[in-house]
Amino acid sequence: MSTNEILLAEITRLKKERNALILAHNYQVEEVQDIADFVGDSFFLSQKAAAATEEVIVFCGVHFMAESAAIIAPDKTVLLPAADAGCPLADFADAEQVRQWRARHPQAAVVAYINSSAEVKAEADICCTSANAIKVVESLPHDEIIFLPDGNLGHYVASHFPEKTFHLWPGYCITHHRITPEDVQAVRERHPQAEILVHPECQPSVVALADFVGSTSQILDRVAKSPAKTLIIGTEMGVIHGLKKNHPDKEIYLLSSGLVCPNMKRTTLQKIHHALENLEMRVTVAEPVRAKAYAALQRMLAVGR
């Protein structure tokens, strides 16, 4: 057996021994996606964490994702193999800032994108993911919305509700934000028959040029249903692995070579093995923050996709 095969066998053994569930985000490296029990976007993985019967959840993603699992399933041991996998977008907002914004806009509902800390979620009325952000806002009777921390996603959601006033946080995903209108125009010239799909975390000027706008899961669904034979994907490069594997009959290209989230690439098979062997690094959320954040996440899950 090769070194990699031995490592995979050890992970399989430890997973059974620890009664563990391995969850991986679509943006993880290929070998991590392949070893996971479930691969998906933030909403899907939140659902799987909530429904888990295993004692241990190994979350192959970034910190806020493992933290959300710990909020939803406090009776589980939640492990983050890559202890240093953070999220610059989540770092744009803290709880004190949210309280200040709420004081300035007391009639507004606070909608926190799941890409946020537990402390920020605890200050929100409801959470959302990019897959259900529009449905979440639609479910609220409020005329004013504070949407945080992703201003680009907030702008996209706001475009569906001209009757509401949105107060958008000045945050952004550094990976999606780097796509430019020039990138879209260049790829359109190279592949004039292609369908261009982008994530709503992209800048509004990029979203306006796309043929389809959707969350990671929505992009995956669209590729499966699209009659186009050539598709250009404007989100993190990790999704390409599953798309090419599931759609060998289609030509699938990344919109820009810079679409890499370095934090999502920090998880390795070696780190997963270490996490299972030593039950490290554990992610917990203390009360009463957990209970308040749980309420916001549960409202999000109740809305559905």
Image (tube, rainbow, N blue to C red):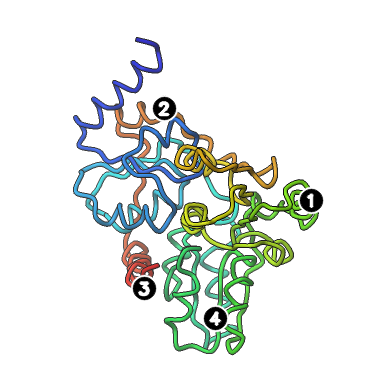
Q: Secondary structure at mark 1?
A: helix
**Mark nearer the viewer, 3 or 2:** 3
- For label 3, the residue is 303
Q: Amino acid at mark 3?
A: Val
Q: Secondary structure at mark 4?
A: strand
Q: Amino acid at mark 2?
A: Leu
Which of the marked residues, 4 or 1, is nearer the chain's N terminus? 4
Q: Characterize the local packing of mark 2: few (<14), some (14-19) or many (20 or more) Cα atoms within 10 angstroms.
A: some
Of residues 267 and 181, which is closer to you in this image? 181
Distance from the alpha carbon under mark 1 to that under mark 2: 39 Å
Distance from the alpha carbon under mark 3 to that under mark 4: 17 Å
Q: Secondary structure at mark 2?
A: helix
Could you say where residue 112 lies in the image, as x and y percent from the top left?
49, 68
Q: Secondary structure at mark 3?
A: helix
Q: Amino acid at mark 1?
A: Glu
* Tag shown at residue 189: 1
Distance from the alpha carbon under mark 2 to that under mark 4: 41 Å
Q: Characterize the local packing of mark 1: few (<14), some (14-19) or many (20 or more) Cα atoms within 10 angstroms.
A: few
Quarter of the image for the C terminus: give it.
bottom left
Distance from the alpha carbon under mark 3 to that under mark 2: 35 Å
Which of the marked residues, 2 or 4, is nearer the chain's N terminus? 4
Of residues 235 and 95, which is closer to you in this image? 235
Looking at the picture, does residue 158 appear above or below residue 93? below
Distance from the alpha carbon under mark 4 to that under mark 1: 38 Å
- For label 4, the residue is 145
